[in-house]
Image: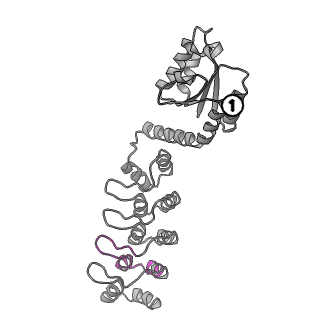
């Protein structure tokens, strides 16, 4: 963040307090004293400081701030949408949606301290959005999904910092966690779960959860991770399939063993009235039936 302080008092303890806090937070900090403005023929330096500023704090000590130079700098800050924090005994002359007015320097500093993390988060979002736009990347869920599928750490992190929700879905209604799973992006699966993605979100296209997609992909590592992270194994897909029916269909005994050990029910009926156990019997899949027998009640 780039803070600009406009102050009427050079030796002001309140000014020193906010300077100390902002320096502690490693914010960029510049100070302009209003007593110096009227004597200047050129305000290009001060103009540049305002244009570079992300936040402006004004310590207004009285009538010396009435000059056109001060009014110009303040108007410039407000015109660019910069948040302005004003401490003034005559705060009624400060107007605008970007102005926060305080009756005491202590109140101004307390407000800045309490909201500083929010300021930082907004600044981070703005910087990430700027980076995406500079690279010609639209801030859309479909673009986010593209970089999830590519397992692109840098771009995914930029989307997240820019405010993209990890539970967002692409235009087909597929959650990002399912997209990562369908593309065998184990690191992105872990990243999304760690960021708070709903592990049991159901995709609109197939009606699968991420763990069902992992079984469909025959990916034991992602399957185990999602199970260990609390995935629901009782979900039935939109076409009536249970997770074990999916597992029997692709014949991966390691995953079937994993699912049974985690409590998946082999006797849940699908849309055709058949269970995973019955499919294994019908198609004489003896290795799978052997796994089922080990977990017989």
Instruction: Give the vertical position of 34 relative to 232 (above or below).
Output: above
The scheme the figure's colours follow is one colour
Residue drawn at x 47%, y 44% as measured from the top left: 162
Residue at the left extreme of this rendering: 272
Q: Position of residue 190 (x, y in %)?
A: 51, 61
Q: Position of residue 36 (x, y in %)?
A: 65, 13
Residue drawn at x 67%, y 33% as measured from the top left: 106
Residue drawn at x 48%, y 61% as measured from the top left: 189
Q: Find out whether residue 255 is within the magenta segment.
A: yes
Residue drawn at x 30%, y 63% as measured from the top left: 205
Q: Quadrant of the C terminus?
A: bottom left
Instruction: Give the vertical position of 55 relative to 6 (above or below).
Output: below
Front-most of residues 206 and 64? 64
Instruction: Give the vertical position of 253 relative to 196 (above or below).
Output: below
Instruction: Give the vertical position of 108 relative to 46 (above or below).
Output: below
Judge left or right: residue 93 versus residue 106. Answer: left
The magenta span reads 234-258
Judge left or right: residue 48 versus residue 243. Answer: right
How many discs appear?
A: 1
Mark 1 crowd level (few <14, some 14–19, many ≥20, 10 Å Cα): some
Q: Quadrant of residue 248?
A: bottom left
Q: Position of residue 242 (x, y in %)?
A: 35, 76
Q: Secondary structure at mark 1?
A: helix
Front-most of residues 148 and 295? 295
Q: Which residue is mark 1?
A: 19
Front-most of residues 72 and 64? 64
Q: Find out whether residue 249 is within the magenta segment.
A: yes
């Amino acid at each position: 963040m780039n803070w600009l302080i406009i102050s009427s008092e050079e030796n002001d303890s309140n000014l020193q307090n906010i300077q100390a806090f902002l320096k502690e937070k490693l914010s960029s900090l510049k100070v302009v004293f209003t007593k110096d403005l009227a004597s200047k023929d050129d305000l290009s330096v001060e103009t540049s400081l305002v244009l570079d500023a992300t936040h402006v704090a004004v310590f207004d000590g009285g009538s010396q701030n009435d000059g056109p130079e001060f009014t110009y700098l303040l108007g410039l800050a407000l015109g660019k949408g910069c948040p302005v924090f004003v401490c003034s005994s005559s705060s009624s002359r400060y107007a605008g949606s970007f102005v926060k007015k305080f009756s005491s320097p202590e109140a101004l500093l307390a407000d800045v301290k309490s909201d500083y993390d929010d300021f930082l988060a907004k600044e981070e979002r703005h910087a990430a959005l700027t980076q995406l736009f500079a690279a010609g990347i639209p801030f859309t869920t479909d673009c986010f999904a593209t970089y999830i599928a590519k397992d692109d750490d840098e771009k995914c992190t930029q989307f997240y910092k820019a405010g993209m929700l990890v539970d967002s879905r692409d235009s087909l209604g597929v959650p990002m966690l399912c997209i990562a799973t369908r593309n065998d992006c184990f690191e992105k699966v872990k990243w999304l779960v760690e960021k708070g993605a709903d592990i049991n979100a159901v995709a609109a296209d197939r009606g699968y959860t991420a763990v069902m997609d992992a079984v469909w992909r025959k990916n034991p590592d992602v399957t185990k991770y999602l199970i260990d992270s609390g995935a629901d194994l009782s979900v039935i897909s939109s076409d009536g399939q249970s997770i074990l029916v999916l597992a029997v269909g692709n014949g991966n005994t390691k995953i079937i063993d994993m699912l049974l050990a985690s409590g998946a029910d082999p006797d849940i009926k699908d849309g055709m009235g058949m269970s995973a156990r019955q499919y294994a019997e019908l198609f004489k899949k003896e290795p799978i039936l052997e796994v089922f027998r080990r977990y017989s009640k």
